[in-house]
Image (spheres, helix red, strand yellow):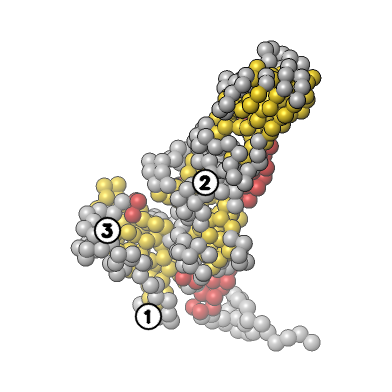
Amino acid sequence: MPSAPIPSFPWSGTTPGSAGPYSAAQFAAFIAGLYNRQADAAEQGVAPWSGLSPSAQLGLLVGYGFDVSALASPNMSVNIGPGAASVNGTWVNNIGTTYNLAIASNVSGNPRIDTIVLHADYTAQTIVATVLQGTPGGAPTPPALTQSTLIWEIPLADIAVANGAASITQANITPRQVPINAPDGVYMLVKNNSGATLQTGDVVVWDNTTQQGVKTSTTQNDPTVAGVMIGRTTATKLGLMVVKGVAWVHVNGAVSNGQLLSQSTTAAQAVPSNLNAGLGVFAYAMSAVAGAGLMPAYVDASQIAQSNIQYLSTTFNSSYRAAGRVYQNTGTDYSLAVATTWTTVDATNFAITLTPTGSRVVVQANFSMDGTSTCDVDFDVLNSVSGNRSQAGNIGTLRVLFGTSFAPVLGQVVTTEFTGLTPGTPVTFSLQYFLNSGTAKIRRNGYPTFMTAHEF
């Protein structure tokens, strides 16, 4: 036997069965269900590009609609652009009108954060864009949204209003829209484990201490970047993250169009990568910005593991080929004389310069040697920046000790690890020796002699 009729709509007429009339609540539930909420209801609403002409969509590639922007000649007001949204299931569609909202002056002595919202009034049956004024304070927070049976608000942007501000610039505006029908890409719910509020464009890395957890990082080129956040997510709450797709990205300085982005040393912010393509790269800049702030970028954090593997494999080859390997096994041997202090073997040929992207590099010197008398010699690698050799806990020196003259000894290897390096600062690694007695030489004619430097 079939079940009793399951509520459904629309049908023609008002009878029989589930035919109308239909209520506003049914339509609101339909819209809310159609556009699946990806996070807290307070953060939902904007439907990118819905109902807009192609020309109107051009400015909305990243902002998703109902963009809040500063005026061309900034003053104490902001503009709200066209867009479409679901406000708790009630549809609002602005095709071409730009609304201007005044921002109240602030002479409180402290900064303030105001929030631009779409405000649905169920008594008046209207939706308007309006400003919720925040409370000034040393560390201000945005005002609370009202979401009740009579009033429902969704956020569009936060406005940072400094004490004594004379104008609102784009740098003072932080988008808050969260799309209900997100454009092509990969989005997921994540838990904010950063200990602070995350906002649109903040770069986050995975946090394996909890399921679906993310946090911020201050490690440049961090290879665990998970994506960038959308909207405003307070600590311990669930929020929406872009893994792959077009999004705002928070950068800590100037960026040129087309540059690759990686995690910077500033929490939640990206920086142009110091690599052409490599470790930690997760986004491509789609425009240029003159300083710190939000910029549109194509994010693909899903490819970061593959990029890291590619980077490590190509770096191993290119680093020593370009800067330190002795290619030909011919030429004058490197003669070692008695030296009671550490002495460089050959700073021109038997050395390698590398600009590290992380803080750890392992250097390996490979050579053959012989001698004509008793020999007691130590070998190690010098770090030109810190001068460290065989740091505590690192792989140590090689000591060669012979009592008589000796024939060529093949396959001598010195491996030294360096930690605490500064990413982006070039450092030269050179082979050094300490000859206690006797004479010896490193053979070149017919014997493999080279150095490599490799990041892990």
Gap between marks 2 and 1 measured at Cα: 52 Å
Residue found 28% across the figure and 62% down from its top: 111
Graded by Cα atoms within 10 Å as few (under 14), some (14 to 19) or many (20 or more), the crowding at tag 2 reads many
Dot 2 falls on a residue whose secondary structure is: loop
Gap between marks 3 and 2 measured at Cα: 31 Å
> Could you say where residue 342 lies in the image, as x and y percent from the top left?
57, 28
Q: Amino acid at mark 2?
A: Gln
Q: Amino acid at mark 1?
A: Thr
Report whether 276 appears left or right of 328: left
> Could you say where residue 345 lies in the image, as x and y percent from the top left?
61, 22
The answer to which quarter of the image holds residue 406 is top right
Q: Quadrant of the N terminus?
A: bottom right
308 versus 65 height, above or below: above
Dot 3 falls on a residue whose secondary structure is: loop
- Give the camera-side residue of 353 and 237: 353
Graded by Cα atoms within 10 Å as few (under 14), some (14 to 19) or many (20 or more), the crowding at tag 1 reads few
Tag 2 and tag 1, C-beta contact below 8 Å: no
Q: Which residue is mark 3?
A: 162
The mark that comes first in sequence, 3 or 2, is: 3
Tag 1 and tag 3, C-beta contact below 8 Å: no
323 versus 421 height, above or below: above
- Give the camera-side residue of 271 and 124: 271
